[in-house]
Each structure stands twice: as C-alpha cells, then as structure tokens.
Image (cartoon, helix red, strand yellow):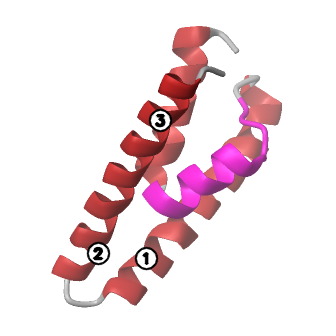
Amino acid sequence: MSLWLQMVLYGVGGVLAVVLLAALFRSGRPVRRLLGSTLQGACALAAVDVVGAFTGVSLGINWLSGVACAALGVPGIITLLLLKLIFGI
C-alpha cells in the first residue's frame, strides 16, 4: 500500500474516532452509550452469523467486523453487509 493511501486512511480513521468520541461525550453518559452500542453490535453480528446458515448471507468474524460492531454498533454491521453486497466479496 502506498504511503499517501495509508496517510488518507489514517486521517479518515482519526476523524471518525474524534466524531465518535464527541457524539459519545455529548450524550452525557459516554461509557454507558459505548457499552450499549458495542453490545448491540456484537448481538447483531452474532445474529447475522446464525441466520447466515439459513440465508447464505454471513459475515466473517475478524478484526474489521469486530471493530465495526464495537465502534458503530448495528449501523456498522449493516454497512458491512452492504459493502459485501456491493463488492461481492
């Protein structure tokens, strides 16, 4: 991966982390919101994995899906499913 692409990816990741932290602290209960979002995302990932046996749609459990479910919750899992649909991975 080229240096400029790494810089762009790290920059976008940093901006997203700052936005996520700002949203969490704005709610007044940042730890509770983060734990709730992480728990909902983990349950959604498990549900997609279980239902995938019947529907054929599944997500692999790896570091990317783990970070997406921990940081973004259910919208992160939906985004991963849409990306899988779009790119056909």
Residue at screen point 20% across, 89% down: 28
Would residue 47 be visible to someone looking at this image? no
The image shows a total of numbered marks equal to 3
Q: Main structural element of the magenta stretch: helix, strand or loop?
A: helix
User: What residue does disc 1 label?
Assistant: 34
Q: What percent of the width, then of the height, locates residue 88?
A: 65, 9
Dot 1 amino acid type: Leu
Position of 20 compared to 34: left or right?
A: left
Labels 3 and 2: the sequence-earlier one: 3
Residue 18 image point, x, y percent: 31, 62
Quarter in which the N terminus is drawn = top right
Q: Is residue 51 above or below residue 84?
A: below
Residue 17 placement: quadrant? bottom left
Please state the horizontal and vertical placement of residue 60, each as a whole percent of the image: 78, 38
**Under tag 1, what secondary structure?**
helix
Disc 3: which residue: 7
Q: Amino acid at mark 2?
A: Leu
Q: Is residue 64 visible?
A: yes
**Disc 1 vs disc 2: Cβ atoms closer than 8 Å?**
yes
Residue sitting at the far left: 26
Residue where numbered disc 2 is placed: 24
At 33% from the left edge and 84% from the top edge, which residue is drawn? Answer: 30
Circle 2 — which element? helix
Residue furthest to the right in view is: 53
Mark 1 or mark 2: which comes first in sequence?
2
Image: 68 above or below 19: above
Q: Which residues are magenta?
A: 58-72
**Residue 54, image x, y percentages:** 78, 30
Amino acid, disc 3: Met
Residue 67 falls inside the magenta stretch? yes
Seen in the picture, residue 70 relative to 63 is either above or below; the reply is below
For marks 3 and 2, give the one nearer the viewer: 3
